[in-house]
Each structure stands twice: as C-alpha cells, then as structure tokens.
Image (tube, rainbow, N blue to C red):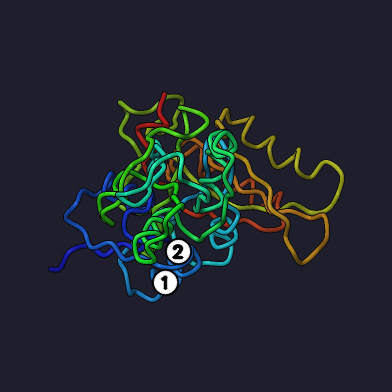
Amino acid sequence: MGRLAIGFQGEHGAYSEEAIYKQFGKDVKTVPTVSIHEVFNLTEAGAVDLGVVPVENSVEGSINETYDMLLSSNLTVVGEVVLRVVHCLIGLQTASMKGIKTVYSHPQALAQCRNFVKSLGVEPRITYDTAGSAKMIKEQNLKGAAAIAGERAAEIYGLKVLKKGIEDYSTNSTRFLIVSREGGNGPTRAGSAKTRRGGISLGSKTSLIFAVPHTPGSLYHALEVFAREKINLTKIESRPTKERPWEYFFFVDIQGHRTDPKVARVLSELAKKTAFLKVLGSYPRSKADRS
C-alpha cells in the first residue's frame, strides 16, 4: 500500500503543507495545487486520498473560497488542524532589509503582517501563495524583493530569512479542514462516557450548513433548537446564497458528534425549521481548540 496522498493549495513549503505534516507526520505524499477549488476537485476525483484546506484565520477571519466549496462539494469533513502561523521576511542570500523595495505574498499573509510591511515603506504585491512567492524570488533572482512565507519555504528554496515573526499578532493561527470523499462520519466515532458531558462528546465537533425561510424570526427559531438542548455553537458564519439577493447560508460548527443522541435530535428538529440543511461531517476537535 502506497503513502497517503494529500492535496493542498500552494507550493511546497506552504502553511497548508505544514498543517498536513503536523497532523499526519512526514510519511505522506503532499500534492501541491493552484487553488482551493482544485484541492476539492482532485479529492473528489480520487487523485488524492484527502485534501487539507484553510477555513479561517484568527486575525483576518474566514476563507470564503473554502466555504463556497464546502457548499457545492460532496466531500465530507473528517478532521481539523490548527496551526500557529509564524511569518518570515525571506529574500535572496545577498539580500538585506535596507535593500528591499517590494514584498510579495498571499493577500492573507500581507494582511496579517500589515503593520510590519507599512513600517518598511515597501510596495506589497499579491501572489497566489506564500511559498510560491519565495519560489518566484529564487527562480527569477529578484533582487530588491522579498516574500512573506514560512521558515520552511526559505529552507526549501535556498533563501535567507531576513526577519522572523513579522506577523502583527503573536496569536496568529489558521484553522484547516481535512476533507475526504468517504461518506459517513469520517474516521472517528462518538466519544466514550469519559469524554462526555451532558450527553455531548466533548472531543468532537460537527460542521453543517443551513438556510432558513426568508420570514421574520426564522433564524431565531433555528438557533433556538441548539440553545434548548444546551449545545454549544463554536462557530457561525454567513455567506450570500448568490442566487437570491440578501439571503444567506449559515455555516455552523457545534460541539458534539452527530451520533450523540442530543445532537441527533437537534439535527432532526433543525431539518424541520430550515429550507436547506447539509451536515458536512463530525470529526475530532483540534487539540489547540480544546479548553
């Protein structure tokens, strides 16, 4: 049996690849892609076993492309990884801080280092990937340019770290989801009695999407179902339906596993109060996300 193949957006050295290694170790085959959309496509087609995609950053918020793909895809969410993101300013081996005129990176990385970039007085330029920016500087021998990327990207492409830890907030972390074409509840089961409280599996999380009728009080009545059963919502995000102006899908993460009796009751009742409901999957909560 071959190594597990896992798709991610970006070039080798990207933070998504770091998240893969954190979760699965180094004995996997990582498959770089141009976009999050392509990660989903390769996973659905069976070209990779799993996909790992960013879904939200603790500073800059949600990754909209991932939410849109979760809505349209048939993939199941089977896990999550929370990665502490440490940004570095990276340049050629001959580069110096004073000589940098342009900084390249993904828009999220540039935003997460906004104050540092402003203090340098340089021109920020958007690219599709952090590690891809580092690779470009190396391949094109860009003097007077630097990339914002991880320290591992500098090692891979033979570049120099000019400054480490340039993110504006030391708590900067990104949450990634692991997606699979396998149905059901993923590779985990509901927690044992030791990990339960009030009938809820504390070590599990369930992600779902729903839409409510465009009538007064419909969202309140949907959310009331969770409150009544004392199920904690760990995340709620709205995204436009794109088909009807000012109507939204709601992406929700809740504590507990879909096989927990309380969660199963809530999902059953929620289906009656919503115009659309899709359960994305139940999976182990990241250790970094547990209190």
Q: Residues within 10 Å of mark 1 (few under 14, many from 20)?
A: many
Position above or below: 32 against 163: below
- Would you say residue 177 is visible in this rendering? yes
**Furthest residue toward right:** 216
Q: Position of residue 97 (x, y in %)?
A: 43, 39
Give amino acid for label 2: Leu
Q: Is residue 144 above or below residue 253?
A: below
Q: How many marks?
A: 2
| Image quadrant assignment for residue 221 | top right
Looking at the image, which residue is at 57% across and 33% down?
119
- The image position of residue 104, as x and y in percent, is 50, 53
Q: Which residue is mark 1?
A: 44
Q: Secondary structure at mark 1?
A: helix
Q: Judge whether residue 184 can be spotted in this image.
A: no
For mark 2, what is the residue? 75
User: Crowding near pointer 2: few (<14 within 10 Å), some, many (20+)?
Assistant: many
> Residue 116 — which label?
none
Q: Are marks 1 and 2 in contact (CB under 8 Å)?
A: yes
**Residue displayed at 46% across by 27% down:** 170
State the separation of the CA atoms marked 1 and 2: 7 Å
Residue 205, image x, y percentages: 45, 40
Question: Could you tell me which secondary element the residue under label 2 belongs to?
Answer: loop
Q: Quadrant of the C terminus?
A: top left
Closer to the chain start, of discs 1 and 2, is 1
Judge by depth and name the residue closer to the eye, 216 or 180.
Answer: 180
**Above or below, 184 relative to 195:** below
Give the amino acid type for the residue marked by disc 1 in the picture.
Answer: Glu
